Amino acid sequence: MEVNNILKTTDRSDHVSIEIEDEDEVLIAAITEEITCKPSSQCFIYKVPKKYQTERDIETFEPRVVSIGPYHHGKVSLIATEVYKRWYLYDLISERTTRNTTLKDFVKAIRKLEVRAREYYAEPVKLTSNEFVKMMVFDGCFILELLYKYIERGISEDEGDENEDKDDKEGSNNKNDPIFGTTWMIYRLRKDLVLLENQIPFIVLQTLFDLAKDHNGGYFLNELVTIFFQPILPSMRPVTTSSFIKGKHILDLLRSHLLPSSRHMKGGNYPEWEYIRSATELRESGVRFRKKGDLADGLLDITFTKDGVLEIPPFFFGESWNILLPNLIALEQSRCDYTDQITSYFIFFDSLINTEDDVKLLRTQGIMEGLINEDEKVADAINNLFKGAVVDKFYYDGLFTRVNAYCRNWKRKKAKMHKWKVSLQRDYFSTPWSVISVFTVFVVLVLTLTQTIFSILSYSP
């Protein structure tokens, strides 16, 4: 009896021990799945934090037509354009490469870059090796073929308008092409391809480009990218490019093109710098506005002269402000080693523009173009461009200081002038008799001066 009880107790203890061990193994497996290493220091492609987004920002930060990279890969609303990637991959391989270059070469080249390419993403990429390489090949070749077709067709600013000089065959190809045969598609694709969350590493694009380089028409990749995105860049002048300008992805490359090329901007530490007043208030304080011409070193080259003129390079307000600029700001906000020059540019205009009158003032001076008769909407858009943006260094700190000092000095001079006018009015024009007396003295002085002049002239030979 006692032996049986001991056996039963031992069996029960072993059973409980086995169950605990099994539960531990399950828990360990679950924890292991959730363990991830911290993002690589090489990551340059981020998701935009939700704290920066509102309901109306969905179009600002999320693609509407095509997904590029892993963050929006497989999204149901974007599946329709996946077939376009297949068609464009076929065109790239069949028309751009030599006979010695095959799809196998593309896959092998991207496979070698897989580890580096994954490190570009701040968020974990939950795709197998084959899935990731396949996505990079499809997405990269789609972008390249899009750039090539855009160059070859010489698309006008009107987006989708067919060139009447092209032969019938070319026109037919345009109509059959799912992208260039649709008026709005290129316009929409530009916006999708500059989104921070919709990027692939530039090393992937460059590798694929090099494999197809025998038929690139003499263009280098940076040039193809700049030409395609020129219509949505805020600068009124064509942005110059070269093979020496580098970027981690397309959005980063466009940012590099917008930064000053030669003159380094010096930043002031937050929160030591002070804001300036709106454009209309500055005008009331003696500040004048002038469009900066060809001497401007890019879009960000804003200066303030000693005689009170704020010189601003002209810009176009459109999708560059509604889509491109917020994503550039999001990029700068994502990495502490990025300079805050684009964010500082935004803060400058957020200070300068408060109402539609401020927009009208800049527009009448030729500084701002686009959206005529939409001044109120433009002011609202700029004031709500990117809420919550912060900077470690503000790159218009010195300019703001000079503007505010000029305004204070101008107000002091105006106050002295007003005081002098009040004193003059009190002492000499306070009563009708004093006005008559001053007028009489003035007339006597004029007559005396006139008589003196005639006397001198009468004695001249």
Image (cartoon, rainbow, N blue to C red):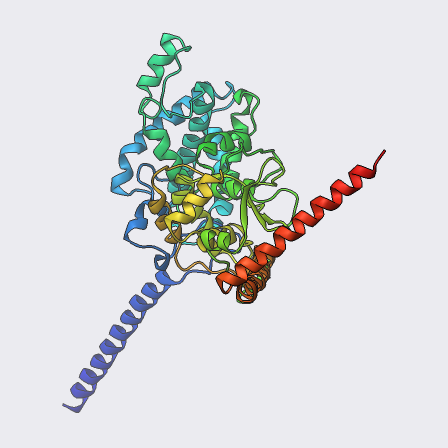
Q: Of residues 246 and 347, which is closer to you in this image?
A: 347
Q: Quadrant of the N terminus?
A: bottom left
Q: Quadrant of the C terminus?
A: top right
Residue 8 location, quadrant? bottom left
Identify whether 274 is placed above or below 231.
below
Q: Residue at x 37, y 37 (%)?
A: 372
Task: Say whether residue 211 is left or right of residue 448.
Answer: left
Q: Residue at x 37, y 53 (%)?
A: 384
Furthest-left residue in this view = 1
Identify whether 393 is placed above or below 44.
below
Q: Position of residue 18 (x, y in %)?
A: 27, 73
Q: Position of residue 204 (x, y in %)?
A: 49, 38
Q: Residue at x 45, y 49 (%)?
A: 45
Identify whether 339 is placed above or below 271.
above
Q: Residue at x 71, y 47 (%)?
A: 449
Q: Of residues 403 and 65, which is closer to you in this image?
A: 403
Let me know if residue 399 appears in the view. no
